[in-house]
Image (tube, rainbow, N blue to C red):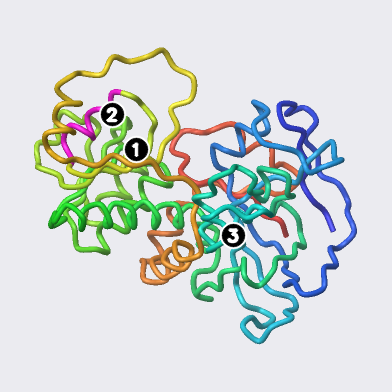
């Protein structure tokens, strides 16, 4: 089989190699169909983020997966089933969170992640996965099944927002989403599915992103100042500090799903801080996802419009040209690599 390999921080060393088919008794054998490129993959390849498998000088990238089962050790899965693989694995000790399969809340940092931290990813034509870490997908999803992992991140964000709102006795009627990338658009999808009034803000003024938002029945803005509606929940997907503060100022519950990275410090308006305290507001971060979130994501995708989901996939590259996905093109939403 053929597989992508990368050396973190050395994009020029990226390549496609021949590897033997994996053989791990007790695991599903899966034909890799598609993988999605996200910002984490770019940070690994370009900037050196991530951790190599022990004793290795390269790692197979990609954690957003879609595959078709070839063989299964359990009747839960059958040949031909569409599946996505879970990214994170619990730490070996385990910590209190990993001991109850809440590895997305790992407390000691000793978890591993496929394609990111110490484990090969899904960027290969054949891969295996323990049944516990595979999620069966609606067969009618087709290529849109590759959106399962980012949708799981969004499902977890909504779970955290819902828990905070319930604790605060907050009836959630509206949501503000900042950023119309894959995470923001999927957050909008789940908001619409919940019957909420959805407001999405991004910098672009026309093209695919505004169209995808309005097709959902949500409202699109290219300027946050134009959002005058009251919002109960905010899902911040950009990591841009002024937007973070503005979300925390406006919403009773804010979920931070974007990474700021290295930027110059931005002062915090004391009125925002005072508003959080005096308003009993909640600001939480979220990263990765657990099994309940993957299952919720699979259900949300199953219920979504197929044309709308396929509209998120804006570019498709062959495995031999997977590094072309590093360069973002105008109107890109989700770029995928075809492993077949």
User: Any mark on residue 179, and which?
Assistant: 1
Mark positioned earlier in the residue sequence (1 or 3): 3
Residue found 9% across the figure and 41% down from its top? 229
Q: Which residue is mark 3?
A: 86
SS of the residue at dot 3?
loop
Q: Which residue is mark 2?
A: 243
| Distance from the alpha carbon under mark 2 to that under mark 3 | 30 Å
Residue 13 horizontal/vertical position (percent): 80, 30
Q: Work out which quarter of the rendered image holds the N terminus and state it.
A: bottom right
**Residue 145 placement, left or right of 201:** right
**Residue 156 placement, left or right of 245:** right
Figure check: 75 above or below 253: below
User: Which one is in front, 64 or 326?
Assistant: 64
Tell me where the magenta segment starts and ends, as one range. Answer: 242-251
Mark positioned earlier in the residue sequence (2 or 3): 3
Q: Is residue 22 located in the magenta-colored stretch of the structure? A: no
Tag 2–tag 1 contact (CB < 8 Å): yes
Residue found 33% across the figure and 32% down from its top? 204
Residue 219 horizontal/vertical position (percent): 20, 46
User: Which one is in front, 314 or 52?
Assistant: 52
Figure check: 82 above or below 219: below
Nearest-to-viewer mark from 1 and 3: 3
| Distance from the alpha carbon under mark 1 to that under mark 3 | 25 Å
């Amino acid at each position: 089989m053929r597989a992508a390999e990368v050396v973190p921080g050395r994009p020029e060393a990226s390549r496609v190699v021949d590897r033997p088919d994996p053989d791990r008794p007790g695991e599903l054998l899966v034909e890799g169909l598609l993988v999605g490129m996200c910002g984490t993959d770019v940070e690994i390849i370009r900037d050196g983020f991530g951790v190599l498998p022990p004793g290795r000088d390269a790692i197979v990238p990609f954690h957003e997966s879609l595959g078709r089962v070839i063989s299964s050790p359990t009747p839960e899965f059958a040949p031909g089933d569409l599946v996505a693989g879970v990214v994170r694995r619990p730490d070996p000790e385990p910590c209190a969170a990993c001991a109850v399969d809440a590895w997305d809340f790992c407390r000691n940092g000793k978890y591993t992640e496929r394609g990111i931290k110490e484990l090969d990813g899904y960027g290969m034509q054949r891969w295996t996965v323990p049944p516990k870490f595979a999620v069966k997908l609606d067969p009618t999803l087709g290529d849109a099944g590759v959106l399962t992992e980012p949708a799981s991140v969004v499902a977890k964000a909504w779970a955290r927002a819902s828990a905070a709102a319930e604790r605060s006795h907050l009836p959630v009627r509206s949501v503000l989403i900042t950023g119309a990338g894959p995470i923001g658009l999927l957050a909008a999808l789940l908001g619409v599915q919940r019957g909420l009034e959805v407001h999405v803000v991004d910098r672009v003024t026309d093209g695919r992103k505004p169209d995808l938002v309005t097709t959902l029945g949500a409202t699109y803005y290219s300027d946050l100042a134009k959002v005058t509606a009251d919002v109960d929940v905010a899902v911040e997907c950009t990591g841009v500090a002024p937007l973070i503060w503005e979300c925390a100022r406006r919403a009773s519950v804010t979920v931070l799903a974007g990474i700021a990275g290295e930027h110059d410090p931005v002062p915090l308006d004391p009125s925002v801080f005072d508003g959080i305290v005096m308003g009993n507001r909640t600001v939480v971060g979220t990263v990765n996802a657990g099994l309940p979130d993957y299952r919720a994501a699979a259900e949300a995708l199953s219920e979504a419009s197929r044309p709308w989901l396929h509209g998120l996939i804006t570019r498709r590259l062959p495995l031999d040209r997977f590094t072309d996905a590093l360069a973002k093109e105008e109107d890109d939403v989700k770029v995928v690599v075809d492993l077949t």
